[in-house]
Image (tube, rainbow, N blue to C red):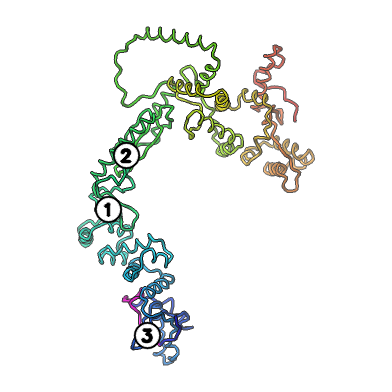
Amino acid sequence: MKLDHIPLDKLYVDKTNMRFGRKAPDVSDLLPTIRARGVIQTLLVRPPDPDGRCGIVAGSRRFHASRIVADERREAGDIDPDALLLPCAILEEGDDAAAIEASMIENMARLDADEVQQWESFARLVREGRSAAEIALTFGLPELSVRRVLALGNLLPRIRELYRAERIDRVTVRHLTLASKSQQKAWLALFDDAHAHVPIGHQVKAWLFGGQSIPVRFALFDLADFGGATIADLFGEDRYFTDPDAFWAAQHAAIAAARDAYRAAGWADVVVIPPTEHFHAWEYEKAAKRKGGRVYIDVRATGEVTFHEGYLTRAEARRIARGGAALSPEAPKPSRPELTSTLQTYVDLHRHAAVRAALIGQPGLALRLMVAHAIVGSPLWSVRPEPQATRHDAVRESIASARAEAVFGAERRVVLDTLGLAAEEPTVTGGNGDDYGVAGLFLRLVALPDAAVMRVLPIVMGETLAAGSAAVEAVGGELGIAMADWWQADDAFFALLRDRDVLGRITAEVSGEVVAAANAREQAKTLRQIIADHLIGAQGRDKVARWVPRWMQFPPSAYTERGGVGTLAAHARVVAARCMDHGDGSAEPEADGKQPLPEAA
């Protein structure tokens, strides 16, 4: 590429320039600079023709601004011949595609070209042999963006001009690319008719498809086996079915196949909700397959189908919670039973007597049956998982992120897998209390070795161990749990620590009596910070490792004599139970649950 200065009157805008053939561009932003300093950046031009004239490939705005400045100086009488020379870079001979690319790169970098301008230039590049992928690589654009611009070529020229003039929006243009030429003409006729309603935006799609446009992505069936036709959005993003009736015939067949597959997989029932109705999540409750949950197939008029797995109506969920059973929507009317109720009771009681007598010599089977009842429940067993409920978000987050919960959750997933239950189940226990569930789980447990069954037991017991109960206190004491292995102070703990007396005693515990006395009149915020600094060894304070507040330890104690510590009340019940077990009754708790305070740690 050769550099030269070319006279202004020997330059013209070449047809490869993006702004060729249009009215003179707005150059008001360039005029001050060119008046003061002239043209600094070179123009890109073609080699001179036989008349010595060079076509401008890139730099049309600088050229027009230079002509305005030259005219101003001629009128003022101070024209300088050198001012009529513009710096130019002369391209190689005969490469139209390179000229078009140079024009577009420079113009798109300096002044955004509208999409119609881009289409005109991209189309010329295509005619010169450039592919969409090559154009995308040259300009650093996604190939889909280039194809979108080229898709404008399928529109009638007048529609493109309306888009260029911003009289119609991008959504309207996008949907008009789906239209045939005759449909585009019909749309223009509506646009020109002042008394007609012209569809715009998403209305265009409904107008083209007679009111129902169904995207191909909603199909549940294999398109390779579909006999109907589809049409593509020329922007390449969506494809639509041209025959809604053909679509629905194939879609309903796919829905029926999915329903049969769910039933074969063991779901209690599969309910198809037609387009005239809707699945409202607030009317249902989650219920796993083993707990009688159904699958609801929600079919929308748009063609979209959503599968909601594992739900029961709220009324059914409440009925099950009271010990009843779910009702099938298609349950047949009962016929006259073979046995009367009294004869059935006679049979049931004799069989029950035989089974429980035989269990006396089968402790392994009895253990498995007990585990199945604890997991699933029955009319005689009401076992519920500890909900770990709290209204405080910070407390909920603290428990969820605790090491103990992570360890328990990992083991729970192992047990769920061992029992053949879904990994996404939130708990192992908490079944629907029917005989079918107990029997099925019992048979699975029978097939497991003793070691696997014993691994299930801690999870079942852990899930159904009531928080804050004497049982927690008794087990923790028997295991000799060191809470420092499972807990450390977090933001939620400090946010809840507000009692000044307690804060003072904890400050003395971690800092010493001297520091506690010196800060006795400080705000609670200051005391909490002192405690926190000691626990991590910050601000030059001695680090206190493995600190746990007294009420969380096994056994627990208190910081004051005011009472109101739930863990102490639970511990008192454990002490009383242990004394009664030894037969001395020496530590019977007071009526209000208060016990003499253990010596402070």
Residue at x 73%, y 41% (from the top left corner): 521
Q: Which residues are magenta?
A: 7-22
Point out the frontmost of discs 3 and 2.
3
| Residue indicated by mark 1 | 231
Q: Quadrant of the C terminus?
A: top right
Quarter holding residue 336 = top left
> Relative to 370, is 517 above or below?
below
- Residue 235 magenta-drawn? no
> Relative to 73, is 319 above or below?
above
The mark found on residue 299 in the picture is: 2
Measured Cα–Cα span from mark 3 to mark 1: 49 Å
Q: Position of residue 120 (x, y in %)?
A: 32, 69
Q: Position of residue 139 (x, y in %)?
A: 42, 67
The answer to which of marks 1 and 2 sits earlier in the sequence is 1
Quarter holding residue 563 = top right
Q: Which element type, helix, strand or loop, lies under badge 1?
A: strand
Q: Which element type, helix, strand or loop, lies under badge 2?
A: strand
> Relative to 510, is 201 above or below?
below
Measured Cα–Cα span from mark 1 to mark 2: 23 Å
| Residue indicated by mark 3 | 48
Residue at x 53%, y 33% (from the top left corner): 413
Measured Cα–Cα span from mark 3 to mark 2: 68 Å
The answer to which of marks 3 and 2 sits earlier in the sequence is 3
Q: Are marks 3 and 1 in contact (CB under 8 Å)?
A: no
